[in-house]
Amino acid sequence: MRRWLGRRSTLFGAIILIVVLSQFSFFAPVRDTLRTAFGAPTNFFHTVGTRFKNAFGVLFAVQDLAKENTSLKEQNISQAAEIAKLSFALGENEQLKRDLQFERQRQDLQLKAANVVNYSPTNLYQSITINKGSNDGIKTGQAVISSGYLVGKINNVSNSTAEVWLLSNRNLLTPVLLSDSQTVGLLKGSIRGLVVENIPLDTKVAKGTPVVTSALEGLYPAGIALGQVEEIISAKEEIFLTLRISTPINPSNLTTVYVVES
């Protein structure tokens, strides 16, 4: 015990002596040597600690960026869904405006609204199914319109649904009228789209001429728009003109249609 206390006293005295002597200039070389000896390990551990700190800092920063990216992606998906919803609502609103405008212009027609519940199983869009049937007063042969344009006619009716043949259906022939010349023709679907046939060769036809329904044979109310002349596609040697017709109605976008009841 005494030996340990003696060693402790000697060490303590040596430290005090070094501290006192370090204040004198002649002890500077020894002081610098001690500083270098003890400073190197200190600098080493400081450098290592700084590098570890920086490494962990980068790791945490990467994790934060990943979380931020995930959050931004979720926000973008949510915003995209919101934009799609607003766009759909805007489209429906515009269609409703056109339908109401047509209804005001054609007060002689009684219209019944119906939703499209099914499209034809092929990509030709030759027919659609609506959620109104015989229980709602729907009958075979009635005209079907959307945004003021004829889209087809009722072909088959069940109690609560009905099949609509679209104008593109090759089994459907629609009597039409060229507004400018009052010339009657037949509209049908073809591989070239909607075409009007049986137009006399000497008929003057210009691109953009409106095409409307004809009351011929009493199949449709007269004057419902179908589209306009896009081009003359018949050959020179033919005795009748064949016209390709464009329409603003896209069958794949139909959601609501109106059945002309009278």
Image (spheres, rainbow, N blue to C red):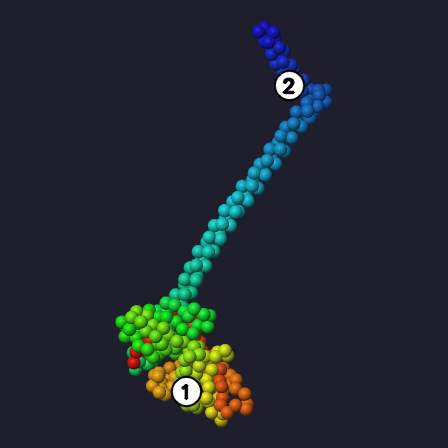
The quadrant in which residue 174 appears is bottom left
Q: Which mark is residue 19?
A: 2
Quadrant holding the C terminus = bottom left
Calculate the distance from the C-alpha at mark 1 to the C-alpha at mark 2. Answer: 116 Å
Residue located beneath label 1 in the image = 177
Q: Disc 1 vs disc 2: which is toward the camera?
A: 1
Query: In the structure shown, which secondary structural element does the residue marked by tag 2 occupy?
Result: helix
Q: Is residue 142 above or below residue 217?
A: above
Vertical placement of residue 21 versus 241, above or below? above
171 or 46: nearer the viewer: 171
Query: Mark 1 is on which residue type?
Result: Leu
Q: Residue at x 50, y 47 (%)?
A: 67
Name the residue: 33% across, 76% down.
259
| Image point (68%, 24%), residue name | 37
**Number of other residues with Cα within 10 Å of mark 2, as a class: few under 14, some 14 to 19, many 20 or more:** few
- Up the image or down, 253 lies above or below 175; here it is above
Q: Quadrant of residue 148?
A: bottom left
Res. 153 mark = none
